[in-house]
Image (tube, grey):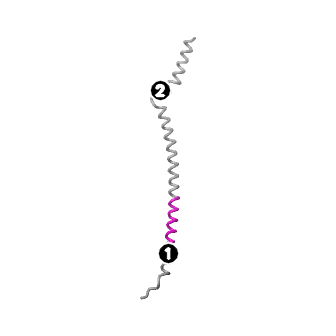
Amino acid sequence: MFEIFLGIALIVFASKVGPAMAQRISGQAMDAQVAQRMRELEERLEQMDERVLSLASDNHERLVDIEERVDFAERVLQQQRSAQLPPQGN
């Protein structure tokens, strides 16, 4: 009776634990974990890329607005200077 139990236990052990141990030894289980981690990191990188592009677009819009304001300020200053100059005689 003990031999039968031992035989069944050996078969169950070999069918369940054996392949898992073989995968662990060969590195396949670790490869699956690494692959999963790589997918997670790639997703995070994609999210970061989208955020950076969004921020770059926002900054570009702000820069264009600032450039327009500087151009306007330069025109106003030029008009004030021109108004303050005495008329030139020919």
Please provide percent x and percent y for residue 59: 51, 59
SS state under label 2: helix
Please provide percent x and percent y for residue 9: 55, 18
Q: Distance between the residues labelled 2 and 1?
A: 80 Å
Please provide percent x and percent y for residue 54: 52, 55
Q: Which of 55 and 19 is in front in this view?
A: 55
From what the image shows, is residue 6 above or below residue 74? above
Q: Is residue 17 shown in magenta?
A: no
Question: What residue do we see at 51% from left, 71% from top?
Answer: 73
Question: What residue do we see at 52% from left, 42% from top?
Answer: 40
From what the image shows, is residue 17 above or below residue 46? above
Label number found at residue 45: none
**Label 1 crowd bin: few (<14), some (14–19), many (20+), radius 10 Å:** few
SS state under label 1: helix
Main SS of the magenta segment? helix
Q: Nearer the viewer, residue 11 or 23?
A: 23
Question: What residue do we see at 46% from left, 85% from top?
Answer: 87
Please provide percent x and percent y for residue 13: 53, 21
Residue at the right extreme? Answer: 1
Q: Is residue 69 shown in magenta?
A: yes
| Residue type, label 2 | Ala
Which quadrant does the C terminus fall into? bottom left
Residue 1 lies in what quarter of the image? Answer: top right
The residue that label 2 is drawn on is 22
| Residue interval drawn in magenta | 58-77
Question: What residue do we see at 56% from left, 12% from top?
Answer: 2
Which label's residue is closer to the chain start, 2 or 1?
2
The residue that label 1 is drawn on is 77
From what the image shows, is residue 70 above or below residue 87? above
Residue 27 lies in what quarter of the image? Answer: top left
